[in-house]
Every structure is written in C-alpha cells, then in structure tokens.
Image: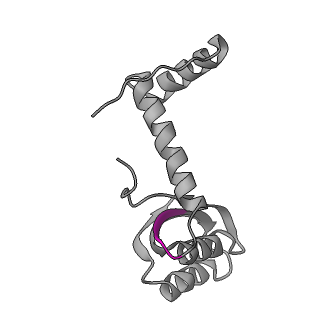
Amino acid sequence: MIERIGISLEAELLAQFDRLIEEKGYVNRSEAIRDLIRDTLVQREWSQANGAEERVAVATLVYDHDASSLAQKLAHIQHENHRAVVSALHVHLDAHNCLEVLVLRGRARDVVRMGEGLVSTKGVKYGKLVPATTGQSLR
C-alpha cells in the first residue's frame, strides 16, 4: 500500500534536489526520496547493531599489484575470513593498478573488522567499506 505525503521545502533546496534527481536519472521525486529514506534506514540499521546481527557490506580497494607483497597480504586477509567473503571481483585497471570489490557477509563486528583491515592495509591507494543490507528490514 502506498501512502501519499506532502513536504515543504525552501525553493533553493528544492531546485538543488531537482537538479540532483535529473543528474541521477530518477523518474520522479518520489523515487529519489524513497532511496534517501532507505539509505538512512540502512545507516541506522548498522549504527544500532550490537555486532552479532548478520550484515552485508561491500569493500572496494584500488592498489598497485606490484607493491611489495600487497596482493598476497590482501589475499591472506580474505583467506583468514573466507566465510565472510561471498564474492570477489578483481579488475586490472592498467599495467599496475587493480580494483578489487568484495561482498562481505556475517556478524556485523566481523564484517567491519575484515573490511577495515583490508581498507587500512599499507599500500592500498583507495579503500572504502560500504554498509549494505540484507533487505529484511526494508519494505
């Protein structure tokens, strides 16, 4: 069931929002607002976790594969946490740089520990852990 609501916004804020909607390709404001709400709910889901709940996240890493044994260090972390790695994608960006995207799943504290361990590994040029959701709490 869809509920209809109304909101009041300053003209400039609405104009900025409409530009964002157009840039991102949303069909209408409602879709954009739904995505903003879902994102906020996922962030809250993670912030309220006690660490034992099942969570999913995505770790993104960019690194130079020629850096002293960095690829082996990253692989070692993944093997130590093999149950948490649902999927891994490895892309050769150029002759030296690689992009690795990992889908992680498990207890929140374990997922965060592993993701932060990967991101903070010396030699990683760019790393980010993005909390996601199993979708169970979103309707």
Q: Position of residue 30 (x, y in %)?
A: 41, 26
Residue at 55%, 58% (x, y): give it: 130
Judged by its main secondary structure, the magenta piece is strand
Of 126 and 85, nearer the camera is 85
Residue at 44%, 76% (x, y): give it: 85
On the picture, is 19 further left or further right than 29? right
Q: Position of residue 8 (x, y in %)?
A: 57, 17
Residue at 64%, 19% (x, y): give it: 13
Is 59 above or below relative to 68? above
Q: Is residue 55 magenta?
A: yes
Where, by quadrant of the figure, is residue 119 drawn?
bottom right
Q: Position of residue 66 (x, y in %)?
A: 63, 74
Of 89 and 58, nearer the camera is 58
**Residue 112: in sight, yes or no?**
yes
Residue placed farthest to the left in the image? 1
- Read off the magenta span: 52-59
Q: Quadrant of the N terminus?
A: top left
Is 33 above or below relative to 137? above
Q: Position of residue 60 (x, y in %)?
A: 55, 61
